[in-house]
Image (cartoon, rainbow, N blue to C red):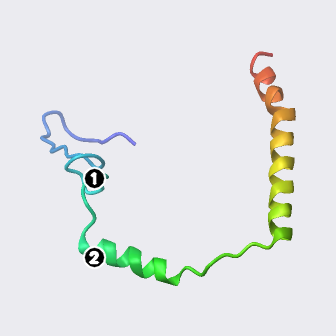
Amino acid sequence: MPADWADGTEVILRPVHGPGGDEDPDRPPTPDEIAHVLAAMEKVEPFDMTDADRAEADRWEKAVNDYTRATLDRGIEDVFR
């Protein structure tokens, strides 16, 4: 939505992302952020897959890949019609 400001209104611009912004991905994490992540990691329970689970996951992945390969061109062809 465009701003409805009078001509000549002074504004201050600051980055939201990137160097100097609140969410600068390059800044190191604070001690509180590190503690938060470590506490969350402690709550994660190990995930053990049985051979049957792995076989089912592999079967599902193959089915999805087969479907994707079979239908990929369909979407591209529709663009040029």
The kind of residue on which mark 1 rests is: Asp
Give the quarter of the image for residue 56: bottom right
Give x and y (percent) for residue 42.
47, 82
Give x and y (percent) for residue 76.
76, 24
Q: Residue at x 28, y 52 (%)?
A: 24
Q: CA distance from mark 2 to mark 1?
A: 16 Å
Q: Residue at x 29, y 41 (%)?
A: 4
Residue, disc 2: 32
Residue 24 numbered mark, or none: 1
Q: Earlier in the sequence, mark 2 or mark 1?
A: 1
Q: Residue furthest top?
A: 80
Relative to 37, is 33 on the left or the right? left
Q: Quadrant of the C terminus?
A: top right
Nearest the camera: 21 or 25?
A: 25
Q: In the image, is residue 16 above or below residue 5?
A: below
Q: In the image, is residue 29 above or below residue 62?
A: below
Q: Residue at x 83, y 69 (%)?
A: 51
Give x and y (percent) for residue 46.
62, 79
